[in-house]
Image (cartoon, rainbow, N blue to C red):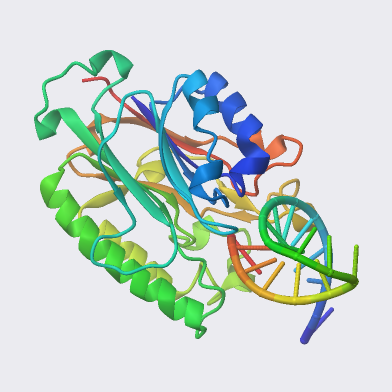
Amino acid sequence: MKLATWNVNSLTVRLPQVLDWLATNPVDVLALQELKMTDDKFPVQAFVQAGYEAQWFGQKTYNGVALLSRAAATDVVKNIPGFDDDMARVISGTYPLGGPGSTQSTGGLQTHIRVIGAYFPNGQEPGSDKFDYKMAWLKGLRDWVRTELQRYPNLVLMGDYNITFDDADVWDPVDMRDQIHCTDEERYHLQALVALGLHDALRLFPQPPKIYSWWDYRDFAFKRNRGMRIDHILLSAALKPSAQACWIDKTPRKNERPSDHTPVVLELTEK
DNA sequence: ATGACGGAAGTTTTCCGA
């Protein structure tokens, strides 16, 4: 079973690239962020034709998230229960554990996986209202994920976190010290999520140095590999033994009119 | 110190992202 996350920075612009990527990378679940479209504009038919179900939660201009999947989702929830939010940032669903061939399994929680796709707030800069919102949102997410983990031992939380774990995730950690995505407060909240019993999937496996998921459009940042790792897949302890591989696919960042983010992929053993 | 680029809204510029 393969799961992936990708901030597409406008699904209107990036739809052909998403379809191309799925044709080459037929993952079982793909979480999308920054759709930047209202629900009525969501291209559900294009995904159905590509063999994918979709659940989506859009918003005009900003935000918007979706889950594409081979198998149908159940228990779909939009945003964070218990946290009031004007913005469309989170969508979750439950899927059969395994590839499309194992959809006939019989329903116990151990045979399913809970997938949460999330677009974490940017935060703009420390001390701003948007930063305060980011901190409150992170606390709301954590309180909810704690209860989700009790219900669903097999859980993946993936998306655009807009937080780096540490300096290894930053091309210039000296320049970025205490800047947005790199502050102690943000990293505290990220570690608090980990402390719920989650694992940074990418770091379960050896990786090349200077591995990032986002590069600024400006100043040839991608060509110079001046980026940050801010897109993550966290998986629960129950799923950790199933993890086979995790990687960042830089290929779509080389497209014409690319998203500034690129996909992160997690492979789990078939069970 | 500033802006670079790209997307959206919608109009000749602004806001925002990261």
Find residue A101 and report its horizontal and vertical position in percent. Answer: 28, 13
Find residue A210 and report its horizontal and vertical position in percent. Answer: 58, 49
- Looking at the image, residue A209 sits to the left or right of residue A134; the answer is right
- Looking at the image, residue A135 sits to the left or right of residue B10; the answer is left
Q: Is residue B6 above or below residue A143?
A: above
User: Dividing the picture into quarters, in which one does residue A11 lie?
Assistant: top right
Find residue A26 and report its horizontal and vertical position in percent. Answer: 47, 21
| Quarter in which the N terminus of chain A is drawn | top left
Closer to the camera, A63 or B5?
A63
- Looking at the image, residue A109 sits to the left or right of residue A170; the answer is left
User: Dividing the picture into quarters, in which one does residue A235 lie?
Assistant: top left
Residue occupying the point 42% across, 76% down: A133
| Quarter in which the C terminus of chain A is drawn | top left
> Is residue A147 visible to the viewer in this orientation of the structure?
yes
Closer to the camera, A261 or A71?
A71
Find residue A29 and report its horizontal and vertical position in percent. Answer: 39, 31
User: Dividing the picture into quarters, in which one does residue A201 lie?
Assistant: top left
Q: How many marks?
A: 0
Residue occupying the point 52% across, 57% down: A63
> Is residue A50 visible to the viewer in this orientation of the structure?
no
Q: Is residue A221 above or below residue B14?
A: above
Closer to the camera, A174 or A44?
A44
Residue occupying the point 35% across, 75% down: A136
Q: Is residue A162 above or below residue A76?
A: below
